[in-house]
Image: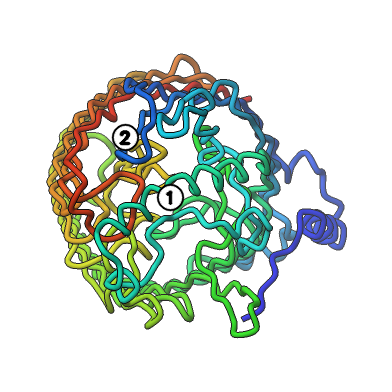
């Protein structure tokens, strides 16, 4: 499917044509301007040197400053159309920023005696082209990319040597990405049409509503409501980030290389059938990316008080099962340090209670096989951040090991909202084949005015890498690698100002 999203220039032209073809509109009545500035910081407590041979890495500290401006066109159709239930709106917005402090530039690799290189491009500025076509993107980011058959021909000593070599190559690759960042993105550029509460279609760039494709979407989605049924289609041909911690220009998370060597963007697509009745919601759905994955899944939820507004009692139960099937070329490859296999499953059970301004709950997340390396880590229904590991963890990304094959996680949470103050607690225990994790975090937020707010998170985070598994290596088990215990504790801060 060859789908191209309109550029910002084309969107602006369309908006002008719609507003000029009908009645004489007052721009001030149909357009609303939003703007603001934000800052995020992460302070890591582990500042020990890097040793790529031993798989020892620190926890990064960095700080960002961001700004944005957005124009929302609230209604682009004349009253004669809106009176009959037709509506058209749109938005155009840009985001930019920079990292103003970066501790990763100074971390020394004890193996070489030289700096490993800046790593915050993984948070702000990542860019390798829409389908990774840029020259510097060809180096690849993940080690352990051979097949099981190729590893079987190697001795343990040869694999250990390869893991050391590829860890150094990853450093070189990271430096090439750091030299080619893009610290800006047009994150909003869309038009949306809806007819009453029956049908809606939206196309362009906008914040993704998909559970398993977080961030901003470059594509389209359509909704059809018929009684208790809702039918929803989603297509993504690009993913971007415009947040105070993450800033990515749009890229395709799923690609495919043709026999002639050309890399194409097959997109990521989803289709949901949702049945809602008296607090129950049954949602069979499928996600798929042609040539890559096919995932038949389902979610069942129950909400005892769907109209809850902060007073009284509410109970929410969520059971979600994912069933990814992978393309044959992946079956004997290593992903997230484990064989990908033909297919896998994951189970999430989450229970949440609310009583007036308080909430608490618990849940489990279990993978059967390597279930998350295609669908589970691009977004999830868990409701908490699992990207708080060190940026070096999975060979240059901060993903938690709770997303590993066959990992089991139990978690509990609680919190409350008291006028301008909000707070939350989260505890998590993960048991996995590569690593165990223990996490306990406290979040505090305060809204000083309608335009200014701030929050802070304190997180204790410990990672115990099991014997045979080395941080930064995504290949088979290394018999000579000892277990390591590494501190990933940190503080997050966030300051938000809105015009």
Left or right of 193 in this view: 147: left
Vertical relation: 423 (above or below) 221:
above
Q: State the residue at coordinates (50%, 67%).
A: 254
Residue 471 lies in quadrant: top left
Left or right of 20 in this view: 440: left
Q: Which of 159 and 332 is in front in this view?
A: 159
- Residue 56's disc number: 2
Q: Which of 291 and 186 is in front in this view?
A: 291
The answer to whether residue 95 is seen in the rendering is: yes
In terms of secondary structure, where does tag 2 sit? loop
Residue 390 rendering spot, x and y as whole percentages = 36, 36
Residue 322 rendering spot, x and y as whole percentages = 26, 68
Q: Name the residue under label 1.
A: 165
- Residue 16's disc number: none
Work out which quarter of the rendered image holds the N terminus and state it. Answer: bottom right
In terms of secondary structure, where does tag 1 sit? helix
């Amino acid at each position: 499917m060859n789908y191209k999203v309109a550029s910002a220039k084309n969107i602006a032209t369309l908006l002008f044509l719609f507003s000029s073809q009908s009645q004489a509109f007052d721009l001030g009545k149909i357009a609303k301007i939003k703007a603001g500035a934000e800052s995020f910081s992460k302070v890591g407590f582990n500042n020990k040197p890097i040793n790529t041979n031993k798989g020892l890495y620190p926890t990064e500290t960095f700080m960002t400053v961001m700004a944005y401006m957005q124009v929302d066109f609230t209604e682009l159709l004349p009253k004669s159309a809106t009176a009959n239930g037709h509506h058209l709106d749109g938005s155009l917005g840009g985001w930019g920023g920079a990292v103003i402090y970066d501790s990763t530039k100074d971390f020394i690799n004890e193996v070489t005696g030289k700096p490993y290189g800046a790593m915050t491009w993984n948070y702000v500025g990542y860019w390798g082209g829409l389908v990774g076509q840029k020259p510097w993107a060809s180096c690849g980011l993940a080690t352990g990319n051979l097949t099981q058959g190729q590893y079987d021909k190697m001795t343990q000593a040869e694999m250990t040597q390869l893991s050391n070599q590829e860890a150094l190559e990853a450093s070189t690759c990271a430096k090439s990405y750091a030299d080619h960042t893009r610290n800006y993105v047009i994150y909003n550029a869309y038009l949306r049409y809806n007819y009453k509460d029956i049908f809606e279609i939206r196309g362009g760039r906008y914040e993704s509503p998909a559970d398993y494709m977080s961030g901003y979407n470059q594509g389209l989605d359509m909704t059809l409501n018929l009684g208790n049924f809702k039918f929803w289609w989603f297509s993504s041909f690009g993913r971007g980030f415009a947040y105070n911690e993450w800033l990515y220009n749009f890229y395709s998370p799923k690609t495919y290389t043709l026999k002639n060597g050309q890399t194409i963007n097959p997109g990521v697509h989803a289709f949901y059938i949702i049945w809602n009745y008296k607090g129950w919601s049954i949602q069979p759905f499928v996600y798929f990316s042609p040539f890559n994955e096919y995932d038949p899944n389902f979610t069942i939820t129950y909400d005892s008080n769907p109209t809850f507004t902060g007073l009284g009692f509410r109970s929410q139960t969520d059971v979600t099962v994912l069933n990814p099937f992978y393309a044959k070329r992946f079956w004997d490859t290593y992903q997230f340090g484990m064989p990908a296999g033909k297919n896998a499953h994951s189970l999430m059970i989450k229970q949440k209670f609310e009583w007036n301004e308080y909430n608490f709950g618990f849940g489990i997340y279990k993978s059967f096989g390597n279930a998350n390396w295609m669908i589970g880590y691009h977004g999830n229904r868990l409701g908490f951040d699992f990207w708080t590991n060190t940026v070096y963890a999975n060979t240059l990304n901060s993903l938690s090991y709770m997303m590993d094959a066959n990992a089991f996680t139990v978690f509990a949470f609680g919190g409350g909202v008291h006028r301008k103050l909000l707070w939350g607690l989260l505890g998590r225990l993960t048991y996995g084949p590569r690593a165990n994790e223990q996490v306990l975090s406290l979040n505090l937020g305060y809204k000083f005015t309608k335009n200014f707010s701030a929050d802070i998170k304190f997180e204790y985070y410990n990672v115990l890498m099991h014997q045979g598994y080395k941080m930064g290596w995504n290949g088979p088990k290394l018999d000579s690698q000892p277990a390591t215990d590494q501190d990933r504790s940190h503080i997050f801060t966030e300051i938000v100002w809105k015009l």
